[in-house]
Image (cartoon, coloured by chain):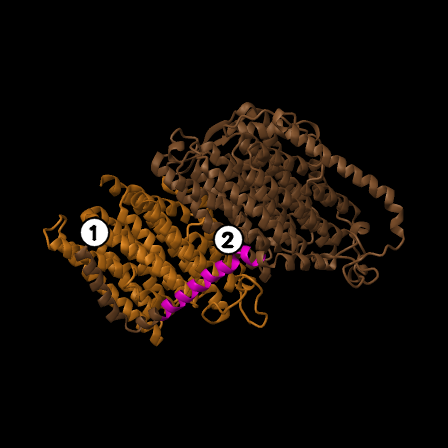
Amino acid sequence: MRTLVVIPFAALLLGILLELALGRILSRRWKGRLAFIAGLTAFGAVLALIPSIQGGQAVQFDLGWWDEGVGLALYVDGLSLIFALMATGIGSAILLYCITYMAHEETGTTRFYGLMLAFIGGLVGLVFSANLLVAYLCWEIIGLCSYFLVGFWYQRKEAAVGARKVLIITHAAGYGFLIAILLVYQSTGSFLWTSAEMSGAFTGAVFFLMLIAAMAKSVIFPLHTWIPEAMNAPTPVSALLHSACYVKAGIYLAARMYSFGGWQPEWNSAVMALGCVTMIVGALFALVQTDLKRLLAYSTISQLGYILTGLGLGTPAGIAAGLFYCLSHGIFKGTLFLCAGAVQHATGTRDMRQLGGLEQRMPGTHRIWLVAAAAIIGVPLTNGFVAKWLLYSAALTSGQGLVVLLAWLVSTFTAFYILKATVSVFYGRLPDELRGQDIHDASPTMLAGMGFLAVLALVFGLAPQLLMKWLVVPAGQGLGMAWPVEVTWLGLQTGAMTLLTTAAAGITVLAFGAGWVFYRLTRRARSSDVPVFTGGDPLPEGDRVGAVDFSELAGTTFGDAYRLLDPDPLYMGVWRGLQAAAGWAADRARGLENRAVLVWIVGALLLAAAMWIW
Amino acid sequence: MNALADVSTNWMWIFSVVFALIAAAVWVYARAIPQGGASWWVLSVAVVGLTLASTLAGAGTASMLLLDAAALCAVGLILADRSPAARRAGRLYLTMTLAAVLCLLLAERLAGGVKPVYPLDQVVSALLLVGFALKLALVPVYFWLPMVAENAAPMSLVLIISVVDIAAFRELVHFREAMPWVFEQHQAVWLAAALLSMFVGALLALGQKNLRRLLAFSTLDDMGYLLLGVTVGSEIGISGALLGAAAHALFKLLLFSAVGTAENGLGHAVTLADRGLGCRFPRSAAAFVVGALGMIGVPPMIGFAGRWRLYLSGVAWGGIWLGLAMAAATVLALLYYVRAIHLVWLGPADEHQAVSGEPKAVRLTMVLLTVGVIVLGLFPAWLLAF
C-alpha cells in the first residue's frame, strides 16, 4: 500500500522533471502526452488505493523529514481519496484535452505542463498529509501554481490582473490557516492532526482561522470575488481550478475539520449560513453575465455554496451529500469549462452576445455540453440530480426547511442561467460575424477528455451507489460519521426517513414526462405563426430573447442586490486608504531624510529613553 | 543558553557559504555589467574577505572589528561613484556606521562579560539598541538605507545589505547569547522596535515609486521579523531568525540583480512608471517574482522555512494577537511586492522603448539562484543538516 501512496507523487514529480529536461527537444503535443501519462499513472495508483480505505480504514506512514522536527507523515483515508481521485482523474482528462488545445501555443508550454502537474501534485500532497505544516506548504504550492497559471499569458494585462487578485485574496486569507496550525502546535507540541491531543487544541479561534482560509480558496462569500477575474487563463486552467484542484482544497479543509474532534454544534449554523448566502450570491451574479466563462465562474461560487451547506448540516447524511456533491460538481463543472474552451477555441470568443447556432457546427461539443448542463441543473439520470436530491433529503431530515427552500430557489436560478447559456451558444442562428469562419468541432482528443467526464456524470447519475459505497461512505466513516448506504439505482433512496423525498422526486419525474409528452403532441403546431403578446409592441420578426435581454432583465430586477452583495468596493476602499496613508508617510519620511543626522540623533535618544523607561 | 550557543555556532558555516555564494554571483554579475572601476573590485574583495573573516572568527571583539572594517570598505563602494548624491549617501552611511561602532564597542566595554549594576545596565542596553538600530537600519534611525539604495551600484548594494548587514545581524545574535539580560530585561522595547520596523517599513515601501527604494524599505520590514525572533530568544526563534537572515541575503541578491539588469538595459532607474519589463527581461522578471515572494515567506521558497519559525516564536510569546499582527504586516508586504510585480514586470511592454537584453552570465546566475532557493525551500532539512 505504501508504494501506491508514493506512486502519484513520484509520477507527477518525474513528469515535471522530464518536462523541464526535455522541454527543448519535445514537440508541444509530446509535452502534452507526457503530462497526460504522468497524470494517468497517478490516477491509476490512487484508484488502486480504494480497497484499502473501506470500512473507515486508513493507510499511514512516515516518508522522512521535510524540515528539522517536521516529518512528512502521510495519512490516506476515504476523504483524502475522494479529493485525490478528483485531482488526478479529472486532472488527467483535462491534460488529455490540453494536447490539442495547447498545441497552437507558441511559447511557454513547458512551463504550462510543469505547473499543471505541480498543481495536481500539490492537491494530492495536501490531502495525503497528516502534518498540518506540510499541508500548509502544499496549500500554498497550489496557490502559487494557480497564480502562475492564471497569469500564463502574463503579457496580457487582463491575465496579469486576474492573477494578482487570485494571489492577494487567497494568500492573505491563507495566513489564517498558518496561524491556526501554530496555535495547535502551541497547545499540543505536534503538527500532526492525527495526534490524540488534537481535539483539545481545536478551539473556536483555530476553527475560525481555518474557515477563513478555506473560504478564500473555495470562493465562499465574501472572499469569492477573485474567481471571475481568473477567467483570462487558458481554459484547461479554469477547468482544473474550478473542478478539481483549487476550489476543492477549501472544501477538503472544511470537511477535514470534522476529523480533528472537538467540533462544536454551534459552528454548523455558521457554516450553513455561509453556504446558503454563497449559493444565492453566485446564482444571482451568474444571471447577469454575458461572458460564458464568467457565467460558469459565478455558477462555481453558487455550487460551492451547496457543498458547504451540505457539510454545514453536520449530520452523516448531510456530509455524505456534501461529499457526493463535491465529486459531482468536479465532473460536470470540468465538462462545462472544457466545452466553453472548445467553443472559444473554435470561434475566438466567449461572449454569448456574439455566439449562437453552434449546434450544427459543433455537434460533439453540443451533446457533451447538454449532458453537463443537465447535471448542473439537476435533471434526473445525471449525477447532479442525485447530489441535489441527497442534499434536500439531508436538510429535510435535519429539520432545515429554510435551507431546502433556498436551495430550491437557487436551483431555479441555475436552470435559468444555464439554459440562457445553452440557447445563446448552441441554438438560434449563427451570427453573421461567424458565418465566414471555418468553425468545426473540437478535435478527437479534446472530445475524449470532456466526453470522459460527461460519461461519468451519467454513470454516477444512473448508479450513484458506486460512488457512495466505495468512496463517500468510507470518507464519512473516516470523519466519524456512520451512514448506511441508502441510495440505489438512479439515486432512489430506500431509508424509512427518506420515502417522502423519494415520492416527491417521483412526482417531479412524472411531471417532466408529462411535459415531454405535451411537447411532442403540440410540436407540429409550432411551424405556424402564433401571435404572442409580449406586453407591448411585438418583437421584430426573427428576433429572439438572447443573453443581453436576459442579463438586462436580471440586472434591472436585482439591481440593488448586486450593489449590496459585491464586496469589491469595500476592498477597493481599504486599498485606496492604505495607498493614501502610505503615500503620505513616504512624503513625510522623504522630508526627514534631508535632515537625517538631526533625526537620527533624536531617534537614537528616543530609543535610549524607551530603554530607560521600560 | 548552551543550546542557543550551539545554534549560532552551527550557523557560522552556513553563513560563510552563503556569503561566498553571494560574492561569486556578485562578481560574475559585475563582469557582465560593470559596477565600477578597479577600486570597486578591490573594495568588494575587501568587503567579502573581511566579512568572511569576521564570520569565521565567531564572536568577540576581533570579529566585531573585522566586520566594522568591512562596513568601512562598503562606504568606499558607495563613494566610488563620484556623483554628489552618492557622495552624500556615502557620508551618511559613514556617519551612521561610525556612530553604531562607537555605541557597540562602548556597550561591550562597559558590560565586560557580566551584567553591570544599575544604572550602568540601562546604559549598556540603550547603547546596544541604538547601535544595532543604526547598523541594521531599524525605525526610527534607518535613513542611510534608502539613500544608499537609490545611489549605489546594484552589486554594491547587495554587498552592503546581503553581506555586511546580515553579518551584523549575526553579531546581534551573539550579543543575545552573551548578554541575555539586555533582551530579557527590556523585551517590550525590543519587540516594539521589531513591530515598528515591520509596519513602518511595509507602509513606507508601499508609498515608494522607485524600485530600489522599495527594496530598501522592504529590508526594514524584514529586519523587524528577524529582530522579533532574536528578542523572543527561544531556540526556534533564533534558528528562525538566522534562517530568515540567510534567506534574506539570497533573495535580496535576486531582487537587486533583476532591478540592476533592467536598469542596465533601459538606461534609467526602474520605477512604477515602467511597464511590461517581463517581455524584455523574462529571467529578471522571474527572478524578481521569486525573490519578492520568497522575501515574504511564500512556500516553497526557502524564506518559508525561516518565516514559520518566526511566526511560531511570535505566537508562543504573544499568542494569537502577535501572530495576527505579524500576518497583517506580511499582507502589507504582499501588497507592495505584488504592486511592483504587476505594474513593472508583467503586462504588455511599451513598444517604443529601446532596450538591450540580459547578459548571458547574468541570466545563468539568476536562473541558478532561482532554482536554488526553490530546491532549498522544498528540502530545508538538507540545509539544516549542513
Res A167 label:
2
Chain for mark 2?
A: A
Residue B245: % across, % down: 34, 51
In screen coordinates, is A441 left or right of A81? right
Residue B133, visible in the rendered structure: yes
For the residue pair A544 and A207, the one nearer the viewer reads as: A544
- Amino acid type, residue under disc 1 in the picture: His
Residue A589 sits above or below residue A327 on the image: below
**Colour that chain B carries in the picture:** orange
- Amino acid type, residue under disc 2 in the picture: Leu
Residue A383 sits above or below residue B261 on the image: above
Q: Main structural element of the magenta stretch: helix, strand or loop?
A: helix
Colour-to-chain, brown = A
Residue B250: % across, % down: 40, 53
In screen coordinates, is A593 left or right of A66? left
Chain for mark 1?
A: B
Q: Which image quarter holds the C terminus of chain B? A: top left
Q: Residues within 10 Å of mark 1 (few under 14, many from 20)?
A: some
Secondary structure under the numbered disc 2 in the rendered image? helix
